[in-house]
Amino acid sequence: MRSYLLFFSLCMGCYSQGRYATDRAEEECLLYSECEWLDLMEIDSEATCIDIMEENFDPEIRQCPDFDRALAKECIEGIALMDCTDLQNNDFPDACYSECGQSG
Protein backbone atom coordinates (compact mmCIF):
# COMPACT_ATOMS: atom_id res chain seq x y z
CA MET A 1 0.00 0.00 0.00
CA ARG A 2 2.83 2.40 0.91
CA SER A 3 4.48 1.88 -2.49
CA TYR A 4 1.18 2.66 -4.22
CA LEU A 5 0.82 5.91 -2.26
CA LEU A 6 4.40 6.88 -3.06
CA PHE A 7 3.81 6.14 -6.75
CA PHE A 8 0.60 8.17 -6.72
CA SER A 9 2.23 11.17 -5.03
CA LEU A 10 5.15 11.08 -7.49
CA CYS A 11 2.76 11.05 -10.44
CA MET A 12 0.98 14.19 -9.29
CA GLY A 13 1.82 17.24 -11.38
CA CYS A 14 2.26 19.52 -8.38
CA TYR A 15 5.00 17.68 -6.47
CA SER A 16 6.02 20.23 -3.86
CA GLN A 17 9.17 20.68 -1.85
CA GLY A 18 7.13 19.92 1.28
CA ARG A 19 5.92 16.62 -0.17
CA TYR A 20 9.49 15.85 -1.20
CA ALA A 21 10.65 16.42 2.39
CA THR A 22 8.11 13.90 3.66
CA ASP A 23 8.78 11.33 0.94
CA ARG A 24 12.54 11.59 1.30
CA ALA A 25 12.34 11.23 5.08
CA GLU A 26 10.09 8.18 4.78
CA GLU A 27 12.21 6.47 2.12
CA GLU A 28 15.55 7.14 3.81
CA CYS A 29 14.30 6.05 7.22
CA LEU A 30 12.78 2.89 5.78
CA LEU A 31 16.17 2.11 4.24
CA TYR A 32 17.98 2.86 7.52
CA SER A 33 15.54 0.60 9.35
CA GLU A 34 15.81 -2.26 6.85
CA CYS A 35 19.60 -2.05 7.01
CA GLU A 36 19.57 -1.87 10.82
CA TRP A 37 21.27 1.53 10.86
CA LEU A 38 18.88 3.26 13.26
CA ASP A 39 20.78 1.92 16.30
CA LEU A 40 24.08 3.01 14.76
CA MET A 41 22.60 6.47 14.31
CA GLU A 42 21.32 6.40 17.91
CA ILE A 43 17.73 6.83 16.73
CA ASP A 44 15.14 4.85 18.66
CA SER A 45 12.54 4.29 15.94
CA GLU A 46 11.66 4.80 12.31
CA ALA A 47 9.08 7.41 13.37
CA THR A 48 11.74 9.42 15.22
CA CYS A 49 14.00 9.14 12.19
CA ILE A 50 11.23 10.51 9.96
CA ASP A 51 10.71 13.47 12.30
CA ILE A 52 14.43 14.27 12.23
CA MET A 53 14.78 13.83 8.48
CA GLU A 54 11.69 15.92 7.69
CA GLU A 55 13.30 18.79 9.60
CA ASN A 56 16.46 18.43 7.47
CA PHE A 57 14.46 18.86 4.27
CA ASP A 58 11.77 21.23 5.57
CA PRO A 59 11.26 23.94 2.92
CA GLU A 60 10.95 26.55 5.68
CA ILE A 61 14.46 25.70 6.90
CA ARG A 62 16.24 24.49 3.76
CA GLN A 63 15.68 27.21 1.22
CA CYS A 64 15.51 25.76 -2.25
CA PRO A 65 14.53 28.50 -4.71
CA ASP A 66 15.41 26.38 -7.76
CA PHE A 67 13.59 23.21 -6.60
CA ASP A 68 13.49 20.74 -9.48
CA ARG A 69 10.42 18.48 -9.24
CA ALA A 70 11.75 15.99 -11.79
CA LEU A 71 15.05 15.54 -9.96
CA ALA A 72 13.23 15.29 -6.63
CA LYS A 73 11.04 12.51 -8.00
CA GLU A 74 14.08 10.77 -9.46
CA CYS A 75 15.81 10.99 -6.08
CA ILE A 76 12.88 9.41 -4.22
CA GLU A 77 12.50 6.65 -6.81
CA GLY A 78 16.23 5.95 -6.61
CA ILE A 79 16.27 5.75 -2.81
CA ALA A 80 13.38 3.27 -2.98
CA LEU A 81 15.59 1.02 -5.13
CA MET A 82 18.65 1.23 -2.85
CA ASP A 83 19.88 -1.72 -0.81
CA CYS A 84 22.11 -1.95 2.24
CA THR A 85 25.29 -2.11 0.15
CA ASP A 86 24.31 1.13 -1.57
CA LEU A 87 23.70 2.72 1.81
CA GLN A 88 26.99 1.49 3.20
CA ASN A 89 28.78 2.94 0.17
CA ASN A 90 26.77 6.18 0.48
CA ASP A 91 25.69 5.55 -3.09
CA PHE A 92 22.62 7.79 -3.20
CA PRO A 93 21.22 8.72 -6.60
CA ASP A 94 22.88 11.75 -8.21
CA ALA A 95 19.48 13.44 -8.35
CA CYS A 96 19.47 13.59 -4.54
CA TYR A 97 22.34 16.07 -4.71
CA SER A 98 20.80 18.26 -7.41
CA GLU A 99 17.11 18.73 -6.55
CA CYS A 100 17.77 22.31 -5.42
CA GLY A 101 19.43 23.22 -8.68
CA GLN A 102 22.88 22.65 -7.18
CA SER A 103 25.33 20.09 -8.47
CA GLY A 104 26.56 17.46 -6.07
Image: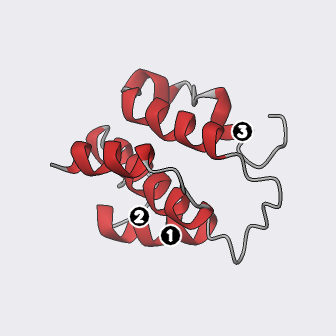
Q: Residue 51: x percent and y percent?
A: 44, 72
Q: Earlier in the sequence, mark 3 or mark 1?
A: 1
Give the percent coordinates (x, y) of residue 81.
38, 27
The disc at residue 49 is 2
46, 66: nearer the viewer: 66
Q: How would you rate the neighbour count of disc 3 (Cα within 10 Å): few for under 14, some for 14-19, many for 20 or more?
A: some
Q: Distance between the residues labelled 3 and 2?
A: 20 Å
Q: Which of 27 and 8 is in front in this view?
A: 8
| Circles 2 and 1 in contact, beta carbons < 8 Å | yes
Q: Distance between the residues labelled 3 and 1?
A: 19 Å
Tell me: 56 left or right of 19: right
Is the C-beta separation of discs 3 and 2 under 8 Å? no
Residue type, mark 1 in image = Ile
What residue does disc 3 label? 97
Q: Whole-percent x and y of residue 39?
A: 35, 55
**Hey, what amino acid is under mark 3?**
Tyr
Nearest the viewer among 74 and 85 is 74
Q: In this view, does 38 lie above or below 96?
A: below
| Farthest bottom residue in view | 60
What residue appears at the point 41 percent right and 64 percent down from the top-left corner? Answer: 49
Residue 18 horizontal/vertical position (percent): 56, 67
Mark 1: give few (<14), some (14-19) or many (20+) Cα within 10 Å. some
Q: Which residue lies furthest to the left in this view?
A: 1
> Which residue lies at the image location 48% right of the left edge and 41% below the top edge?
76
* Upstream in sequence: badge 3 or badge 2: 2
For disc 1, the marked residue is 52
